[in-house]
Image (spheres, helix red, strand yellow):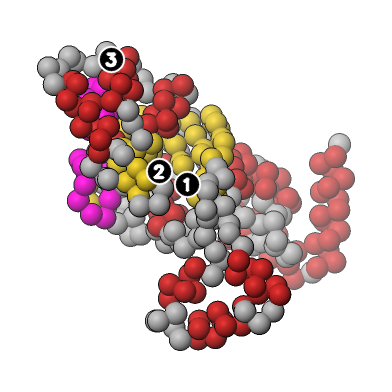
Amino acid sequence: MGIAFSYIRKMEELGLFRRGDTKILDIGSSNLYLAKAEEITDFLKSRGAPGRADLAEFAARLAYGSGYDPVKGGRNEAFVGELFEAAGLHYESFDIANGYRTTVLDLNHAALPMALQRKFDLVLNFGTTEHILNQLNCFKVIHDATKVGGYIYHSLPAVGYVDHGYITYTGRCFFDIAGYNDYELVACWFDGPGEGGGSVLDGLRSYKSHFPVLNDALEAFDRTEQGRALRDLKIPDIGINVVYRKVRDKPFWGALESSTSVGVIPGGVTAAYQGGSAARRVTVSGIQSAMKLRIGQPLIRWVAGALQAHPRLHGLARRVYRVLMRR
């Protein structure tokens, strides 16, 4: 995990740092990358940070440690938390290994400690959650840690990054999460495309010694024109940046992606996704959504079950609902 200095400037532009003791939580103990000594000095002075006799030496050390080579990687000798603390900001991080101001927390399984609930003004997720299988828990921890009025900043892989981790993210994912949780969408942009990129076959090559059948798959790619084209295709690396503001004190609601659902989603399922205004808009069974405001969940489940048992009646009810909603 790492945060280039240009992103810190972007945070300033977006007003994510409050004057005073902004409390920052870093999901993953992030290194600082690509910072110049004069930029560090200017940032600290602009924050009205307390004067320090070793400012020049401090800035030079962080700048050297932030050196980054896109092929060889970074020196990993400077932490973003050091810069934030020098600027008078409060910094904490979660990681699975010891790091700068780090609490060891396994985001696959662990809930947010009660003492950290709604504590932070800014939560940063710069290249961490794509390495974690339990996405629901990750986003819940981030939500629970953020104060009402606080900001959440995700900077994550969207395209490419072949075998970089477990996950690449779509805009749909972030926009649905925002809708279900009534987040204000502050900003969204893409980075890239990066130079180089990986091959779709990189994962097969990495794991072929563990799973011999992958050798057969690699050989098969050489036998067809399509296979050779995929073998030689370099996928560019593109990142997505999304900034939210949490505007309501409410439990986190996971998003229900229902665009490919062809049947009726039972009320017992949709009841777990009724947290935000967008959830009420995108529930596949519009009938259940409209009735939600008028009757209780037991009756909703009964009606949904009855409609499921009679497809023709359900189709008629959907047509009536669409006519009514157009008025």
Q: Is residue 6 above or below residue 232?
A: above
- Residues 48 and 40: in front is 40
- Residue 72 seen in the figure: yes
Res. 156 mark: 1
Give the alpha-carbon distance from disc 1 to disc 2, as whole Å: 6 Å
In primary-sequence order, the first of circles 3 and 2 is 3
**Which residue bears the numbered disc 3?**
45
Please report whichever mark, 1 or 2, sits nearer to the chain's N-terminal start.
Answer: 2
| Mark earlier in primary sequence (1, 3) | 3
Asked if the residue at tag 2 contacts the one at tag 1, i.e. Cβ–Cβ closer than 8 Å, the answer is yes
Mark 2 belongs to which amino acid?
Answer: Phe
Foreground: 236 or 13?
Answer: 236
Residue type at mark 3?
Lys
Q: Nearer the viewer, mark 3 or mark 2?
A: 3
Residue that appears at 13% across and 21% down: 54
Q: Callout 1, which amino acid?
A: Leu
Tell me: residue 254, above or below residue 6. Answer: below
Which portion, as a residue range, is magenta?
82-101
Q: Position of residue 288 (x, y in %)?
A: 69, 52
Image quadrant occupied by the C terminus: top right
Asked which secondary structure carries label 2, the reply is strand
Dot 3 falls on a residue whose secondary structure is helix
Q: Is residue 50 left or right of residue 108?
A: left
> Picture coordinates of residue 268 (x, y %)?
58, 60
Residue at (74%, 51%) from the top-left corner? 287
Q: Is residue 176 visible?
A: no
Q: Please check the rendered image and state whether residue 87 is part of the magenta-colored stretch, yes or no.
A: yes
Numbered label attached to residue 126 = 2
Residue displayed at 46% across by 42% down: 155
